[in-house]
Amino acid sequence: MQIFLPMKKTYFLALFLITIALTSCSDTVIVENRPDQSAIAPAIPGYFKKRALIEDYTGTWCGNCTRVAYAIDLVKEQSDKVVSVAIHYGNDPYNFGPVAIAPLKNLISPNAPLALPVSRLNRLNVWTFPETSNIQEAIDLTGNNTTLGIAMNSTVDNTSIDLDVNVKFLDDYSDLKLVVYLLENHLMYFQRNYLEYYGGIDPIPVFEHNHVLRSAMTHILGDEITGTTNGNTVTKNFSIPVPSNVNANNISFVAFVVGADNKVINVRESHANENQAFEINP
């Protein structure tokens, strides 16, 4: 016996069966909207500002390193969203040390010596030579809209440092690590200079070295973060003495989060005794 359904009921039954079939497929992909994180995208309310990191491997003895230093100056003239760190290496009063830097050196240059100058954007991207002609590469890594924000609060006196690093998530993340640097600024020392930058003087008798890496407060490749789910805020506290070779009046901090690929997702810098809010778009 055949059963005939009215056309309208048949239509809705078919639509229901198609919906069940689509939603039950194991390979169904649910597409969610994500903000445009490019440097030129307008700010979307509720998302975080996205900054970029330049790690400048340098030395006071390195006459060609003034090229990268000058390129960083040019970048910062055009963007306030770029954070720089100077990692001194070799025969240098601010040498970070071959043992301390080894994990990072093995990450960026595993099969070759660290022949300065070397620069990396967001930890792993090679900044194209000559860096002074390619400043847009750094700026292009910044943006107005990202789903991971960083804010720092610190208390620093002549002997001790108490730092809170807060990381807030607007999306679900996994396999993240937090890197926190202690930097020193306003270090006046000579700088070799084989190039035309800074007046072409060699050596530059008094050069101001800023954002100099003095201590990694986490593992230099980062400490694991848990609880990285949408809506969560993770706080990491660091309480340490002021390093004996650092002037407490010139301390600043840089904190950044990397993914499983070791690339920077977002970064922020902070002065000593600064209390930051998250950089959320209004």
Image: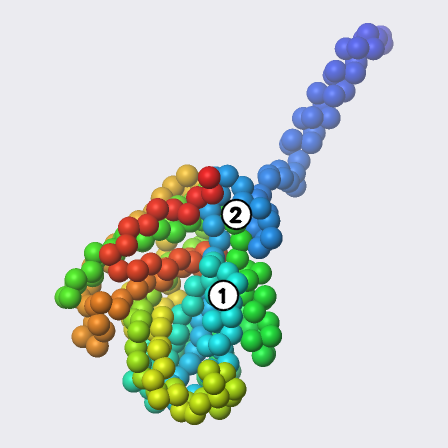
Residue behind mark 2: 145
129 relative position to 203: left or right: right
Say which residue appears at 54% left-offset and 41% top-offset. Answer: 44
Vertical placement of residue 31 versus 54, above or below? above
Residue 264 visible within the image = no
Residue 22: horizontal and vertical position, in percent?
69, 31
Residue 271: horizontal and vertical position, in percent?
30, 60
Q: Tell me the element at label 1.
A: helix
Say which residue appears at 83% left-offset and 10% top-offset. Answer: 7
Query: In the drawing, what numbered circle is on residue 77?
Result: 1
Q: Tell me the element at label 2.
A: strand
Vertical placement of residue 99 versus 5, above or below? below
Residue 250: horizontal and vertical position, in percent?
26, 68
Q: Mark 2, residues whose alpha carbon is within 10 Å: few (<14), some, or many (≥20)?
A: many
Say which residue appears at 58% left-offset and 79% top-offset. Answer: 130
**Image quadrant in which you'd find residue 229:** top left
Residue 140: horizontal and vertical position, in percent?
58, 60
At label 1, the amino acid type is Glu
At label 2, the amino acid type is Asn
Q: List the single residue furthest toward the front.
A: 199
Say which residue appears at 49% left-offset and 65% top-offset. Answer: 77
Residue 102 visible within the image = yes
